[in-house]
Amino acid sequence: MWGGKVMTVDLEGNAEIIVELQNYPSGLGWDPQGRLLIVSMQDRRLLRLDPDGLTEVADISNLATYHCNDMVVDEHGNAYIGNFGFDFSTNAPFKPAEIILVALDGQARIVADKMAFPNGTVITPNGSTLIVGETWGACLTAFNIEKDGSLTNRRIWV
């Protein structure tokens, strides 16, 4: 991430740079066509790696409170992206963050708010529940995933 590279490493330890980003890659996922999706942390964008290079899927800078981080992608291609909420590295005051849904067509909207630094996001194998770690909340929070990608029934999972 801080090296600005997305890389692969094989079982023998050989590393290959797949793509480099100036604004730090963060969350990674794959769309239903198998194309790599990459969260660009500091400029708050979702990018897709196409055969001819990087393509912007969505600019979510108007939705994310601060730098973007983790992402999970569901089987329909919906990308759920969290953000820091605030600049904790400078001891800025806590600000809650959002989870932003970017649909396969690039449409973006906030689907959860008042999150305490959402990170470590997963979707259960049956595709019905999104679970996210709230780093500053010291808990895992669960949501039901609706057919339109909305998140409902927010609850503490553990």
Image (cartoon, rainbow, N blue to C red):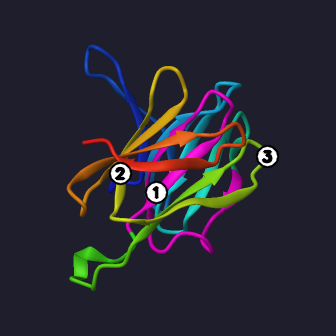
**Circle 3 crowding by C-alpha within 10 Å: few under 14, some 14–19, many from 20:** few
Q: Vertical placement of 13 versus 131: above or below?
A: above
Which residue is tagged 2? 119
| Circles 3 and 1: CB atoms closer than 8 Å | no
Q: Which is nearer the eye, 129 or 119?
A: 129
Q: Pinpoint residue 18: horizontal percent, then vertical percent.
A: 50, 36
Q: Vertical placement of 65 versus 133: above or below?
A: below
Query: The residue under label 1 is which amino acid type?
Result: Gly
Q: Which is nearer the eye, 80 or 141?
A: 141
Query: The residue under label 2 is which amino acid type?
Result: Asn
Q: Give the left or right position of residue 99, taking residue 137 as reference.
A: right
Local secondary structure at mark 3: loop
Query: The residue under label 3 is which amino acid type?
Result: Asp
Q: Pinpoint residue 30: horizontal percent, then vertical percent.
A: 58, 32
Whole-number angstrom distance, CA of label 3 to CA of label 1: 19 Å
Which residue is tagged 3? 105
| Circles 1 and 2: CB atoms closer than 8 Å | yes
Q: Which mark is residue 82?
A: 1
